[in-house]
Image (cartoon, helix red, strand yellow):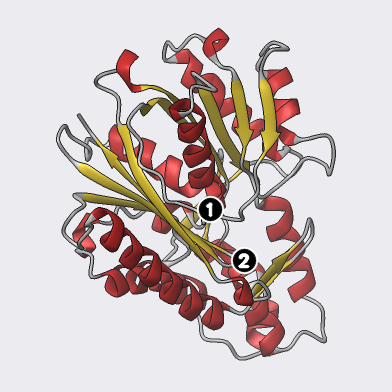
Amino acid sequence: MRREPRFTKAAIVAWARDEGMDNLTSCALEEALSPVADRLRLPKGILASMTGINRRQLYPSDWAPSRASIRAAEKLFGKGLDRTLIDTVFSTSVGRDFLEPSMASAIQAALGLGPEVKSLDLGSACLGFVDGLELAALKIEADLSEYVLVVAGENSRPLLENTITRLMEPEVTVKDFFDNFASLTLGSGGAAMVVGPAARHPSAPRLISSVSRTDPSGNNLCRGDFTSMTTDSTGLLEAGVALAKDTFDKGSNLFGWTPGSFDLIVCHQVSEANTKRFGQALGLDPAAIIETYPDFGNMGPVAIPFTFDLAWEKGLIHKGQRLGLMGIGSGLCCSMMEVNIP
């Protein structure tokens, strides 16, 4: 029987994010889609009004996803952490440069990490980064690692451009449009974190515990490849929120979590509706949820570490706080992790 972990030795000792340099507003995206929107008689402003996303950041079309991971990791090392301490690299991106070799191997090479470093890819849709943090902490708890680098990078621009091209085809129906609607919420970015020994970093955010649940019956609600992504948005929302409620209840039973346990919630964000429904289902204070979707869209597994870094930059995170890192990934899978700020 799988047991949910408690952590006593692991902390997030360094972190950084990377932002796409091109700003694409929802208004500009709607303008590009205006021929099909007019033909299908869709209301003006539908993208922003249905998602709450005002803009998203994008990289150039020819940028590989690993480049965003590498840029974030280089920023992390630029803050002072010695890269020679790293003994493990987990790449948790949804997007990939290629099918093989692993993204982690390319990132390891680009960062100049030596042959003693173990590197591998972890895939869990939008939940991959949180799962990477959990596995990194477990390696530290078992004294199998000292410093684990977890990265994710997403360049949604090629998929977004492919979606626009596909939606402009004359035979596209209203159903086709909304089957592809979730693709229009995607943003780009990179993130990196290092999980290391808490004893050597007493002021670093401490990993406390995590819980997970899955609902594999929902694995067909979102399907994507290198060129397209189709989503049953309503079905995914309903199933995802139900799974999140079950997961939080599990945390309540095991660790005594209540809706008021967390000072701040750092969560994966798809849109305004998803974020609000998620908070309502768990009984969370809306003010506790740090929102990044309005300006950055849905960044997949990058969203949680990106939001974490942005919250620190804005001075939202303080000593003594309890943070909840929470996400839902298509598949369906859900993980929640408690982080304490010493």
First-in-chain label (1 vs 2): 1
Residue 15, quarter of the rendered image: top left
10 to 49, vertically: above or below: above
Q: Residue at x 48, y 38 (%)?
A: 133
Q: Foreground: 171 or 70?
A: 70
Mark 2 highlights which residue? 331
User: In the picture provided, is 108 more to the left or to the right than 273?
Assistant: right
* Whole-percent x, y for residue 281 in the image: 31, 74
Q: Residue at x 30, y 57 (%)?
A: 254
User: In the picture provided, is 241 more to the left or to the right than 110?
Assistant: left
Residue 241, quarter of the rendered image: bottom left
* Whole-percent x, y for residue 126 in the image: 56, 55
Q: Secondary structure at mark 1?
A: loop
- As shown in the figure, which amino acid type bears the numbered disc 1? Leu
User: In the picture provided, is 238 more to the left or to the right than 106?
Assistant: left
The answer to whether marks 1 and 2 mark residues whose Cβ atoms lie closer than 8 Å is yes
Q: Residue at x 82, y 87 (%)?
A: 171
* Whole-percent x, y for residue 124 in the image: 61, 53
Circle 1 crowding by C-alpha within 10 Å: few under 14, some 14–19, many from 20: many
Circle 2 crowding by C-alpha within 10 Å: few under 14, some 14–19, many from 20: many
Q: Quadrant of the C terminus?
A: top left
Mark 1 highlights which residue? 127
Q: Residue at x 18, y 34 (%)?
A: 318
Q: Is residue 141 visible?
A: yes
- As shown in the figure, which amino acid type bears the numbered disc 2? Gly
